Image: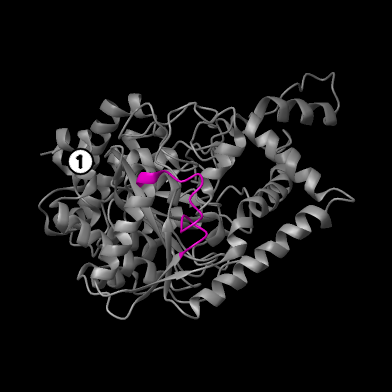
């Protein structure tokens, strides 16, 4: 019974908890047992506090037994990416420079999840300061893909994707700067949604690139992702970029999509993202699964057309100027004085030397690479030539999205050009690593919502379809993704994740 609980989706888990068929303590214990048994091989978590999790679950059970009115998600376990600041809980952002830091406050999304009664299992592994596409840049070791332990689980939210796909958590928070929710979701067979920029609070998220960073849900079903999104989303006065707009109807949109009727929905296939004549760098199997998914959407009543957005070809170059430039500013706060690592402070060195030694020892190679690149792009004489031009490209991309959405309701593409690659295969080739975000970068630069939903297997590994929508039209993403999910599940007779060996052994 306890093992079976780890394979439940959140909607079903919530139903059983509310009905009293199972206790929060039982659900939490089942996941903690699985973490103890499996995480040594997967490396999904950086911190797990079993005692605190069980205490929180027991408190939910006691409140429910006393007749206290609880929300539908009370007692559901959750995992947080380790850049979500959580009061009293070690939060490192995958970096040695923050090793052992216990924040004195919590991020808004952590607070909202706690207020909903969810139970924190732990903090998940990630690329250092969210800089990477494979979780191989973590200072604390790699995470592994549950489908093949010798392959990457994506990044930078690879710990979260590994935990959810490996049934070490029913769902998790990831963050997406250039695709770091969607890409790991795609290569592990999950649903991952990047919300409209500003619709989910960034307060308490350790910053990488402030104009791009966005937290969002990673889950096993579209409905589960929508349920989490409704909890964490909405205006937050503590975040100056937060949109003061109501957030509602996401779960309803997912339920409507699952009914399978997309009549009247106009779907645009982006030519520049794996379309005709733009297939270099794309796995043939990824393109085949994408075509099949689009055909399935058409069979559900969607009107499918091809859309051209030429500036999308420039997104990779623009992103890798804008994001490192913002990172070089954001990471300046790690100077070894106020918090975190302090190196060389033996009384013989001045402040500048201590700062230099702290950063040398505390930052990993990829973080240093991006700080140097960003500082150069912002330097006198180069600012307009590099950073300024990249911002102009960003405006072009936003304009082409607006033009495209004048004729279609959503845009679709592969989420990742390839399936998960072997660990170590791209470590010495940063450009190849950066290309993993080829399909996800345009929506990030424009601040638009986008979701990755499983679209089958290639070479025995998951492939994701990306669905993009206009700003604040996140419900469209959920509706179309849920329709595809339901149709594929019906056609194969089971969910894609049920083909994962660990799921079969757990069931």
Image quadrant assignment for residue 46: top left
Q: Residue at x 24, y 62 (%)?
A: 72
| Picture quarter with the N terminus | top left
Secondary structure, magenta segment, majority class: loop
Q: Secondary structure at mark 1?
A: helix
Residue 425 picture location, percent across and down: 49, 28
Q: Circle 1: is it few (<14), some (14-19), or many (20+) Cα within 10 Å?
A: few
Residue 330 picture location, percent across and down: 69, 48
| Picture quarter with the C terminus | top left
Q: Which residue in the rendered view is the most extreme toward the front?
A: 277
Q: Residue at x 34, y 51 (%)?
A: 288
* Segment colored magenta: 270-285
Nearest to the observer: residue 58 or residue 47? 47
Left or right for 3, reference 310: left
Residue tagged 1: 499
The correct choice, above or below, for 444 with respect to 132 in the image is below
Q: Residue at x 43, y 43 (%)?
A: 418
Image label count: 1
Residue 27 picture location, percent across and down: 20, 43
In magenta stretch: residue 507: no
Image quadrant assignment for residue 504: top left
Image quadrant assignment for residue 148: top left
């Amino acid at each position: 019974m306890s093992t079976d609980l780890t394979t439940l989706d959140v909607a079903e888990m919530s139903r059983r908890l509310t009905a009293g068929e199972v206790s929060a303590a039982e659900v939490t214990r089942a996941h903690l047992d699985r973490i103890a048994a499996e995480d040594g091989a997967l490396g999904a978590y950086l911190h797990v506090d079993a005692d605190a999790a069980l205490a929180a679950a027991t408190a939910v059970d006691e409140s429910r037994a006393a007749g206290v009115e609880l929300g539908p998600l009370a007692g559901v376990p959750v995992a947080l990416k380790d850049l979500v600041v959580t009061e009293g809980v070690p939060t490192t952002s995958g970096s040695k420079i923050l090793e052992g830091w216990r924040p004195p406050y919590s991020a808004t999304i952590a607070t909202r999840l706690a207020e909903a009664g969810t139970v924190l299992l732990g903090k998940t592994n990630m690329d250092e300061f969210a800089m990477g596409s494979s979780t191989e840049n973590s200072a604390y070791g790699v995470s592994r893909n549950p489908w093949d332990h010798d392959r990457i689980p994506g990044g930078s939210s690879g710990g979260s994707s590994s935990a959810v796909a490996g049934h070490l958590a029913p769902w998790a928070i990831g963050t997406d700067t250039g695709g770091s929710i969607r890409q790991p979701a795609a290569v592990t067979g999950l649903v991952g949604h990047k919300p409209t920029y500003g619709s989910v609070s960034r307060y308490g998220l350790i910053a990488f690139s402030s104009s791009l960073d966005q937290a969002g849900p990673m889950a096993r079903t579209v409905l589960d992702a929508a349920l989490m999104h409704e909890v964490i989303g909405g205006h937050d006065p503590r975040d100056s970029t937060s949109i003061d707009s109501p957030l509602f109807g996401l779960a309803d949109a997912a339920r409507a999509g699952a009914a399978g009727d997309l009549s009247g929905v106009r779907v645009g296939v982006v030519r520049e993202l794996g379309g005709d004549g733009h297939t270099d760098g794309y796995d043939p199997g990824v393109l085949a699964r994408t075509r099949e998914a689009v055909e399935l959407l058409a069979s559900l009543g969607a009107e499918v057309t091809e859309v051209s957005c030429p500036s999308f070809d420039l997104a990779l170059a623009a992103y890798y100027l804008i994001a490192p430039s913002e990172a070089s500013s954001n990471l300046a706060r790690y100077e070894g004085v106020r918090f975190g690592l302090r190196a060389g402070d033996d009384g013989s060195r001045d402040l500048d030397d201590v700062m230099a030694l702290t950063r040398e020892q505390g930052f990993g190679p990829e973080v240093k690479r991006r700080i140097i690149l960003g500082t150069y792009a912002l330097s006198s004489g180069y600012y307009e030539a590099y950073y300024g031009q990249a911002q102009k490209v960003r405006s072009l991309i936003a304009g082409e999205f607006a033009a495209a959405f004048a004729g279609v309701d959503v845009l679709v593409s592969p989420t990742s050009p390839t399936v998960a690659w072997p660990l170590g295969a791209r470590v010495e080739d940063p450009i190849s690593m950066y290309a993993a975000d080829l399909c996800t970068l345009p929506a990030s630069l424009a601040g638009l919502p986008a979701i990755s939903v499983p679209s089958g297997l290639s070479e025995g590994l998951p492939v994701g379809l990306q669905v993009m929508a206009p700003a604040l039209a996140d419900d469209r993403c959920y509706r179309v993704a849920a329709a595809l999910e339901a149709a594929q599940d019906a056609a194969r007779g089971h969910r894609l994740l049920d083909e994962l060996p660990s799921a079969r052994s757990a069931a």
